[in-house]
Image (cartoon, rainbow, N blue to C red):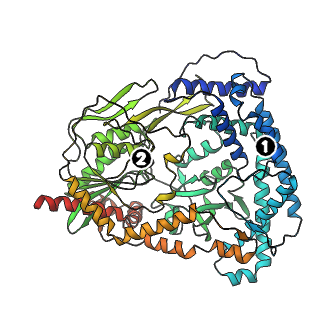
Amino acid sequence: MNRILLFLLFIPFVSHSQDSGKSCDVLIKINKLIQHEHFNPKPVDDSLSVYVFETLMNELDTDKNIFLKTEYDYLSKYKFKLDDYIAGNDCSFFEDFSKTYKKALERSKTAIEKLQKEKLDYNTNDTVRFTKKNFPFYVKAEDVSKVFAKRLRFDILEDIAKTSKNYDSLKQNFASLEKKSREKIFETALCKITNRLDSKEGIEKNIRNSFYSIFCSYFDPHTSYFSYDTKSSFLSELSTDNFSLGMYVSLNENEELIVQEIVPGGPAARTEIIEKGDQVIKVSPKKGEDFLVSCSSLETIGSIIFSDTHKEITLSMRKKNGTLYDVTLQKKIMKADDHAAYSYIVSKNNTRIGYINIPSFYTDFDRNTVQGISDDVTKEILKLKKDNIEGLILDLQDDGGGSMEEAIKLSGMFIDAGPISVLVNNKKEQKIIKDFNRGVVYNGPIVVLVNGNSASASEFFASVMQDYNRAIIIGATTLGKASMQQILPIENGNEQDFVKLTIEKFYRITGKSHQLTGVVPDVAIPTLYDGIISREKSSKTALKNDVITTKAKFVPYSRSDFENLIAHSKKRVSNNAYFNEINAINTKINSIYNSPKDPILLNFESVFKDVHSIDAFFDSVKKIVETPIDFEIANTSYEKEILKFDEFQKSISEYRIKDLKTNAYVLEGINIISDYYATKKN
C-alpha cells in the first residue's frame, strides 16, 4: 500500500521531563496530522478532554472495582484540563495516571491473594447484580475486597455450571470441581493484574498508547493510533502466515478471542466441531503447557497459533450456549486462494442462476501475489456464463470491505460507463469517481445480498448498484460506514508511530450518503442477531449523515420491472415461515442481550439455572439455521473438471455447498430472478 509521507513543522517547546516531552511530542504530531488531513477535524478543547478522560478511565477500570473514589476524584482534576496540558506541552499527567493505576492494581492483587487463602462460603444470601449502567466507585478498600469476594465466588460457580448440563452430577461432585475451578479462577484473576503490573512495555507506556488511540477516536471511530506491537501486530498476522489452523479469529468488545470465520477444507473445518462465534479459552502447544487467553499476552497466544514451531495445538473452546470442548488441530499450509471469491450454479424449477460469494474487497497491494476481487469475480462470471446462467446473485453478507479501488472496479463491471461516487475531502472539494470503461461483464438481472456486517467497500458497491437500478438489494441494512482511511506516519521517517486516518467521505451519485444510516435494502429480510450487531450509529464519535449538491450526472437503468419484483418479494418474505421464525428468535435474542438481568443468589443452584436458562433456546436456534433450504447447488463445468483431480479443492467445495445450502437469502434471490423471467413471458 502506498503511504502518503507528510512533512510537518512543529513549534519548539520546553518539556517538564524527558518522558513527558516525548509523550507530548507524539501527541502534538498526531494532532497536527489530524488537524491537517482529517476529513472533519475538531478543536482540542474541553469536550475532547472529557471524552478522553472518561473513555480512558472506563478502559482502565471497566467494572469499577480497581480505583477507589478518592483516586478517581484525584485524577478528575484532568477531566476538563487535558487539552490545556497538551497545549502547554506538559504531559506529566501520564505519570499521575500510571502511579495511581499501579497503586490500585497492587491493592487489588493483595485483596485477591488474601481471598485465595480463605475458605469461600457458597451458602450465603449474597446476590450478584448485573446492570449496563455505570457503577459508582467504592469509597473504602474494604468495599473493593467485598466486591472481589462476590465476583470470584460467582465466577467459580459459573465455571462449574458451564462444564455440564447435568445438575445432579455437578452437585454430587461439587467439592472436587470447586477445587479445580477455584484454582483456575484465582489464577486467571491474578494473572490479569500481574500482566498489567509487569508488562514488558510498562504501565505508563501502555497508558500512553491507550491515550493516543482514544485521542484519535474522538475525531471518528475509524481514526486510530497504530504501532507495530500488541494488538496491531497480532491481528495483522491472521492472514499472513503460511501454516494455518484454518480459521480467522478476532477480539470482541469483551476482549474475548472469537472464531470469526472458518476456512473451508482447513484443519478447523475438518473437525466439524468448531463453529463461527465459538470462544477460544485456552491454547496448549504441548501436553502440560497451557496458556489461558484471558491472562496471556496477545503476542504469546499469537506466536503459538502462528509459529511454525508449534505444528499441533490443542484448543479449549466454548460455544455460545456455554458448552466446553477440547479439540486438537494439526496445522497445514493453506493455499493462497482459500479466502477468495468463489461461485456455484444455484437453481429451482429449472432456473439456472450464478451465485458468487465475495468475502472481502481484497487486492494486490505490494507483493504482487494476490489478485484483486474484481479480477476474480470476472473469472467466476466467465465460468458461469459458459454454463448459460439466467441471472446473478452477488453475496456481500458479512463482507467487511477492503480496497476502495477494487470496489470502484467491481462497480464499473456492471454499468456502461458513468459516475459512480463522489469523494469529498476536508476542504469540501468534490471529486467525482467515474467508470470510464465502456461495456459490462454481465448484463443480466442481478440480486445483491447484504446484512449488518456488510461494511465500507461492500456498502459502496451495493449503493452504486442500487442508484443505477442495476440490482435489487435484499437482506438487512448495512453497517453505515461511508468514509475512507489511510495509514500515515506521524512524520517523515518515523516507522514506529502511525495514524489510521479518515481522510475522505464518499457520497452516492445522488448526493445522499449512507454514512450512519447504512444502505437500506430494497427488500428487508429478517437476519439472525441483527438487533445486536454494532453498527456505525452506535459509536458516539461517528461522522454525521448529510446530503451534498453534486454536479454528477448519471443515467440509471430502467426501473420498470423493479416495483413489481420488489412487491412480490416483500409479500413472499412476510409469509415465509422461516423468516417469521427468525423474527421471533431475534425478539428473544434482543431481550436476552438488551434487557436488565435479574439479581442472582450466590449459590450453585441459582447460578446453574441462570447459566443453562437459554440452552434449549440456542439449541432450537442452531437447528433452524442448520436446516437445508429447498434449492439445488452445482459446481460450474470448469470446476467439475478441476475437482476430479484435486481432493483438497473438492473438500473445500463440499464444505461451501453444505454452508450455502442453509442460506435462505439465496433462495429469495432465485425467486426474484425467476419472477423477472415470468414477468417477461406475460
Q: Tell me if I can see residue 110 in this picture.
A: no
Q: Nearer the viewer, residue 582 or 453?
A: 582
Residue 175 place in picture, x, y as percent:
80, 78
**214 lies above or below 637:** above
As drawn, the label of residue 72 is 1
Q: Tell me if I can see residue 239 in this picture.
A: yes
What amino acid type should be assigned to the residue bearing mark 1?
Answer: Tyr
As drawn, the label of residue 518 is 2
As drawn, the label of residue 666 is none
Q: Which residue is at a point 84% across and 50% down the rendered structure image?
A: 139
Question: In the figure, residue 319 lies in which quadrant?
Answer: bottom right
The quadrant of the picture occupied by the C terminus is bottom left
Residue 289 place in picture, x, y as percent:
73, 61
Q: Which residue is at a point 75% across and 59% down the rendered structure image?
A: 188
Find numbered disc 2 in the image and state the secondary structure of the residue it sits on.
loop
Choose the circle earlier in sequence order: 1 or 2.
1
Residue 204 place in picture, x, y as percent:
76, 37
Q: Nearer the viewer, residue 666 or 615?
A: 615
Labels 1 and 2 touching (C-beta < 8 A): no
Disc 1 versus disc 2: nearer the observer:
1
Cα distance in 3D space between marks 1 and 2: 39 Å
**165 lies above or below 197:** below
Q: Which residue is at a point 73% across and 36% down the rendered structure image?
A: 205
Residue 253 place in picture, x, y as percent:
60, 52
Label 2 neighbour load within 10 Å: few <14, some 14-19, many 20+:
many
